[in-house]
């Protein structure tokens, strides 16, 4: 009986300590190592489409807007971390996990998320599109 009780206590302790340790530990990728990444070529993306990619060890999305410009945001929902989906029919992002919705700027349109999606800097060099370190939130 003591072994079963001890095992249960160990499992509960692990569930409590793991998030604390993850919060206190530094990120696995230093910001300088991946501060600018090549995403795609300009001729590949059509207007009102999105391309998902990995940036700073997290999912990110590059969107070509209807006017031809580009925007890039984190694709990780600020509620519980699910990957948001771009909805081209309404120019917004939807999180299928709990129903949060974000404007194309990253601003929260519908909760339960309360924080906006972090925005990234987009630069075009010749025919190549790059995304770099975050700029201030929307």
Image (cartoon, helix red, strand yellow):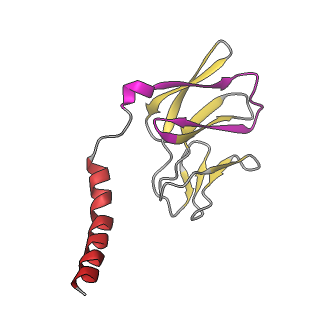
Residue 119 x, y percent position in the rendering: 51, 37
- Tell me the quadrant of the picture where the N terminus can be found: bottom left
Q: Position of residue 98 (x, y in %)?
A: 57, 65
Q: Nearer the viewer, residue 106 or 6?
A: 6
In the figure, is residue 121 to the left or right of 32?
right
Q: Is 36 left or right of 101, judged from the image as shown?
A: left
Name the residue located 33 percent from the left edge and 66 percent from the top edge.
15
Measuring from the top left, give residue 28's x and y in whole percent.
Answer: 37, 38
Residue at the extreme top: 126
Give the x, y percent position of residue 19: 32, 58
In the image, residue 129 sits, relative to residue 55, either above or below, namely above
Q: Residue at x 27, y 53 (%)?
A: 21
Relative horizontal placement of residue 4, taking residue 92 as reference (left or right): left
Q: Does 123 lie within the magenta span?
A: no
Spot the residue most to the bottom.
Answer: 1
Magenta span has 46? yes
Q: Residue at x 45, y 41 (%)?
A: 137
Range of the magenta residues? Answer: 30-58
Q: Residue at x 60, y 48 (%)?
A: 103
Q: In terms of image quadrants, where is residue 136?
A: top left
Query: How many marks can you see?
Result: 0
- Residue 54, compared with residue 20, is above or below; it is above
Identify whether 133 is placed above or below 18. above
């Amino acid at each position: 009986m003591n072994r079963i009780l001890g095992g249960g206590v160990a499992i509960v302790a692990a569930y409590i300590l793991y998030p604390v340790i993850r919060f206190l530990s530094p990120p696995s990728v230093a910001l300088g190592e991946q501060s600018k990444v090549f995403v795609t070529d300009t001729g590949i993306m059509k207007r009102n489409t999105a391309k998902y990619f990995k940036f700073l060890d997290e999912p990110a999305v590059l969107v070509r807007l209807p006017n031809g410009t580009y925007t890039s945001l984190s694709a990780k929902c600020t509620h519980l971390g699910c990957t948001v989906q771009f909805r081209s029919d309404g120019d917004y992002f939807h999180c299928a996990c709990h129903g949060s919705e974000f404007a194309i700027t990253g601003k929260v349109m519908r909760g339960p998320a309360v924080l906006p999606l972090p925005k990234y800097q987009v630069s075009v060099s010749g025919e190549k599109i790059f995304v770099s370190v975050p700029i201030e939130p929307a």
